[in-house]
Image: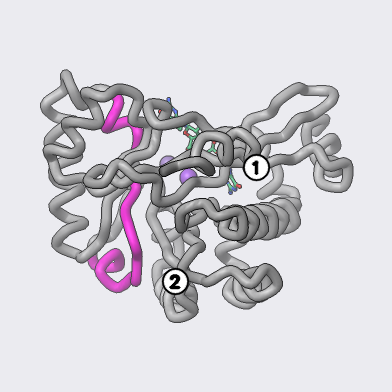
Amino acid sequence: LQLENALRHALERDQLALHYQPQIDLRSGQIIGCEALMRWHSPEFGIVSPAEFIPIAEDSGQVLAIGEWALQTAIGQAKAWERAGLPPLTMAVNLSVVQFRQRNLAETVQRILEQNALASSSLELELTERVAMDDPVTAVDIINCLHRQGVKLSIDDFGTGYSSLAYLKQLNLHRLKIDRSFVRDIADDPDDREIVRTIIALARGLGLRTIAEGVETCEQRDILAQEGCDECQGYYFGKPMPPEAFIDLFGSDP
Ligand code: G
Ligand code: G
Ligand code: NA
Ligand code: MN
């Protein structure tokens, strides 16, 4: 409850920030995008993880305002980097189940893209399996509507939830994000490697790209490349970082 009360002021007091984590194409080695990850700097509680405060914000309804702030901030940032001459990047933003259930989600997204003059193809929305499969019939409508607008959709933490393959087939998705729990021991655990191989084959069959999360070593990266994974994200390539650090690292890319 204390956390909930403090969270009430977080937005207006400017305590929320987005950090950005690079995403790398395995074939070219080039950066192709980033994921926006929320950080809350609370004067009382210190740095609070979104894993902790997003569920609270979902219960209290605050996640709608916070989520719209994140969309606005990430899309504004993507436009600023485009203007600054960074290579073309896709900006990935996480969506809460509460945002996803909003009737006007597609309109909200469209409005923010237009306000910032950002191409819709530069935005990707990340849904967890749970969110996408919770109410599959509605999910198909919303995802296909966003897809028609040109926004990319991906399934986060893939392999940890329960995806109905029948529904997965109906969704106009851009990529599957292979959960980092399968990547962690991929060099030593043949089962994990087999799971990753299977997800990549499934994605291929459905015409989707794959991105592996939580890549921390060059050995993991090499195995993922061997298995035909398209893209990677993880501490090996860069931690989530404030925008100034991000442009320092990637702004001067040759
Ligand atoms: O970056 P970190 O490991 O602390 O993120 C923890 C969790 O919080 C992850 O599951 C991530 O998807 C989620 N998360 C991070 N930023 C956002 C956000 O802006 N919106 C939502 N809904 N979830 C987020
Ligand atoms: O659920 P989601 O995939 O959105 O979670 C993203 C979270 O994973 C973020 O909190 C981010 O800080 C964390 N993360 C990103 N890269 C790595 C990594 O290489 N290793 C570990 N352990 N966590 C990572
Ligand atoms: Na995510
Ligand atoms: Mn994830």
Q: How many marks?
A: 2
Front one among 175 and 129: 175
Residue 229 drawn at (x, y percent): 21, 45
Residue ID at (75%, 22%): 46
The image quadrant that residue 19 belongs to is top right
> Which residue corresponds to mark 2?
143
Residue ID at (26%, 24%): 218
* Local SS, label 1: strand
CA gap between label 1 and label 2 equals 24 Å
Q: How would you rate the neighbour count of disc 1 (Cα within 10 Å): few for under 14, some for 14-19, many for 20 or more?
A: many
* Local SS, label 2: helix
Front one among 223 and 169: 223
Q: What span is colored magenta in the figure? A: 166-184
Q: Disc 1 marks which amino acid?
A: Leu
Q: Is residue 61 visible?
A: no
The residue mark sitting in front, 1 or 2, is 1
Q: How would you rate the neighbour count of disc 2 (Cα within 10 Å): few for under 14, some for 14-19, many for 20 or more?
A: many
100 shown above or below 130: below
| Quadrant holding the N terminus | top right
Residue 110 drawn in magenta:
no
208 shown above or below 34: below
Which mark, by number, is residue 254? none
* Label 1 beta carbon less than 8 Å to ligand 1: yes
Residue ID at (44%, 69%): 139
The image quadrant that residue 166 belongs to is bottom left
Residue 141 drawn at (x, y percent): 44, 78
| Quadrant holding the C terminus | top left
Q: Disc 2 marks which amino acid?
A: Ile
Q: Is residue 48 left or right of residue 218?
A: right
> Which residue corresponds to mark 1?
18
Q: Is residue 117 visible?
A: yes
